[in-house]
Amino acid sequence: MNSTRETDRLHGTFVPNFAETVPSTADIPDIADDRTTLDAAQPQPASAPPTIRYALDDVGTVKGELDSGSTTDDFSPTLVGRAEPNSIVYLFAQNKYGGIGFKGSVKTDSDGNWVIQSREMISGDGLYSFHASYTNSKQDYRPDFVLNMLAQTDPVPQIAFAHDNSGDMTGKIYQYGTTDDKTPTLEGRGAPGSVVEVQAQSSCGEWCTLGSVTVDAQGNWQFQVTERDRYGEWTFRARGYHHGQASSWSESFTLIVIPEKPQPPTVDYLLDDQGCVPEVVLDEGATDDPTPVLNGTGVAGQVIEVQYLLQALGSVATWQTGSTVVGEDGTWQFMFPTLYQQGCWVCQARASTGELKSAWTEPFSFTLTPPAHTAQDTAPEEKNAAVPETIDINTLLAHAEAEGDPELMAELHALLSDLENALRTPSTQNYVMRDGEQMAWSDSAGVFTLSELGWHNVPLGEQELMVPYLARNEWV
């Protein structure tokens, strides 16, 4: 079977173990036959040794360039290389038994290029190494280039590698490689024009056919695997159909499919809902809400883990954690438990599928400030908007009558009655308020409190009653 340069890079480099014990060279004939006549040209001085760039396979159904380590069914390949211009290059080969033989010679062109059609290898299937030299001698032999030669009886395809097209890490995956792509693309070699059938087997299942693909004119094929229904070890194999004949199955090719690492979520903003109107707080912003809501986006249904700490504590700070789930709309929210201290808080988020977790997001920081005074603290109540800035009791009574508020009218009449009694009864003079004091009374309806802002003289018989002004936000 043949392999192109691209495919052969994927097989790795076959390096024979020439240190193994082999039969005595006295028992092994030189692979150069008796008819071989070596070129009598003298060695050429050179500054750089000859090199073998690649081999050419022009036998069988699959042809093309071969890198060192490739498999081929061409037992007399063409070797292509470089050497000193106009020098003589001698080619030697060594078989699997250790025997070394001369395979041809040639003179390089003016640019230093050389091509030699090797004489046939006669020791059968196996590894053959090649060496190019300026000297017509095998004494300095070294294995510069290796080919695995196998006679082909049928067009058995090869699965050279798989291609990962998804996730953080993409690219070529070789035998027993790991991938998070559940639909990897298998690539290999086969007889041009033949049909390659691909099968898969899980670690606990039977072989099943995934589909087929036609080999192109250069002997290459690609097949995208249908999505695997589980993670773990998956094994693939292929066979070719050529001229109505089915080849034997290729060697198995195994991948380990693992879950894809989740992508990090986003942390977009903090929602302060402490006041009447929710407020969006961006990174490095400030909030007086001790239980703000962190907002972001992610993959629907994914768990989002959140960690946060008070930056002021420095190295003694411990990350506090929490979690939430991304909604169907792809957004998530995380409400902080009550943050116990004001200062700069830092938080991060990551997605989790259980065993696999994404990277943490960039830190998101915000400053927790003291609570701000609300409009309720300083502004008058809406129901008092029609009440003047200051009002005496009689005016307030007229206002209550106009509004039809019998409960307030009853309280104000009682107040006037109490004030009259205060003028006539020495023991109750404490009803007349001094500047800065407050007066309160209660009945079955509840407690009523007044705080004075000033005094107003009200004639009462032969005397005057000092009645305090009322602020519009002081009466209830």
Image (cartoon, rainbow, N blue to C red):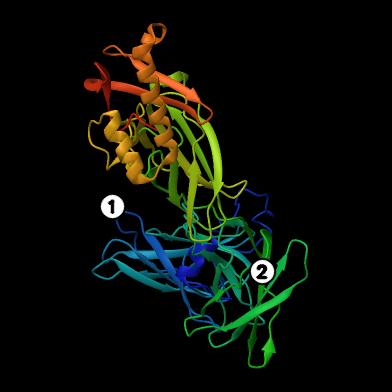
Tell me if residue 180 comes above or below residue 102 in the rendering. Answer: above
Front one among 358 and 341: 341
Front one among 177 and 313: 313
User: Which of the two labelled residues, at mark 1 and mark 2, occupies the earlier sequence position?
Assistant: 1
Front one among 297 and 143: 297
Q: Name the quadrant of the C terminus.
A: top left
Q: Residue flagged by tag 1: what amino acid is it?
A: Ser
Residue 208, how many percent across, how many down?
Answer: 72, 75
**Mark on residue 236?**
2
**Mark on residue 268?**
none
Front one among 304 and 2: 304
Residue 30, how many percent across, how many down?
Answer: 59, 64
How far apart, in angstroms, are the residues tagged by discs 1 and 2?
A: 49 Å
> For the residue labelled by badge 2, is the local secondary structure a helix, a strand or a loop?
strand
| Residue 26, quarter of picture | bottom right
Dots 1 and 2: beta carbons under 8 Å? no
Residue 40 located left or right of residue 166 = left
Q: Residues within 10 Å of mark 2 (few under 14, many from 20)?
A: many
Residue 266, how many percent across, how many down?
Answer: 42, 49
Q: Residue flagged by tag 2: what amino acid is it?
A: Phe
Residue 270 located left or right of residue 443 = left
Residue 325, how many percent across, how many down?
Answer: 56, 50
Using the rendered image of the protein, determine whether residue 282 is visible from the camera's viewpoint.
Answer: no
Residue at the front extreme of this rendering: 462
Q: How crowded is mark 1: few (under 14 residues within 10 Å), some or many (20 or more)?
A: few
**Mark on residue 47?**
1
**Which residue is rendered at x = 46% and y = 35% of the image?**
291
| Residue 470, quarter of picture | top left
